[in-house]
């Protein structure tokens, strides 16, 4: 079976300079730049913030404009923590009252420690 494929000649590739041993003396052209643009560094998302008054780390998720969309704990929970910190009163209710009474009666039954 005869082979009908034929390959034609290829022209030699031309380089930056005709003589490979001769250095290129043209000055380099700097890349074209447009006017400088002021790009703001993107905020990390989510962002961690320490609330020093409460001693809590707050995780805040922001949108493209930098507005807080979600936080952990929520703003409502943070508000409740702040109110509790301001009042610092013991919780009231039937269950908590029973716990206080049990703690007080246990403290009054402690041995005096005088050894006699």
Image (cartoon, grey):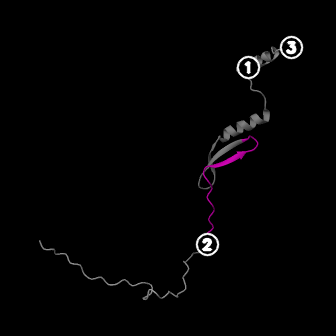
Position of 28 relative to 64 (above/below):
below
Name which of mark 2 and mark 3 comes first in the sequence.
Answer: 2
- Between marks 2 and 3 in the image, the one whose residue lies nearer the viewer: 3
Instruction: Please give the count of numbered marks on the rendered protein.
Output: 3
Which portion, as a residue range, is magenta?
36-55
- The residue at the point 71 percent across, 46 percent down is 50
- Tell me the residue that label 2 is attached to: 36
Name which of mark 1 and mark 2 comes first in the sequence.
Answer: 2
Of 64 and 2, which appears nearest the observer? 2
Of 66 and 5, which appears nearest the observer? 5
Mark 1–mark 2 distance (CA, rounded to whole Å): 68 Å
Position of 92 relative to 46 (above/below):
above
- Tell me the residue that label 1 is attached to: 99
Mark 2–mark 3 distance (CA, rounded to whole Å): 85 Å
Mark 1–mark 3 distance (CA, rounded to whole Å): 30 Å
Where disc 2 sits, the SS reads loop
């Amino acid at each position: 079976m005869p082979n009908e494929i034929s390959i034609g000649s290829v022209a030699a590739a031309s380089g930056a300079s005709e003589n490979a041993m001769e250095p290129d003396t043209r000055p380099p052209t700097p890349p074209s730049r447009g006017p400088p643009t002021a790009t703001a560094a993107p905020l990390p998302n989510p962002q961690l913030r320490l609330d020093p008054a409460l001693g809590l780390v707050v995780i805040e998720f922001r949108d493209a404009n930098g507005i807080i969309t979600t936080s952990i704990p929520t703003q409502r929970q943070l508000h409740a923590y702040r109110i509790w910190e301001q009042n610092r009163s013991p919780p009231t209710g039937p269950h908590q009252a029973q716990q206080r009474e049990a703690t007080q009666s246990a403290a009054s039954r402690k041995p005096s420690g005088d050894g006699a």
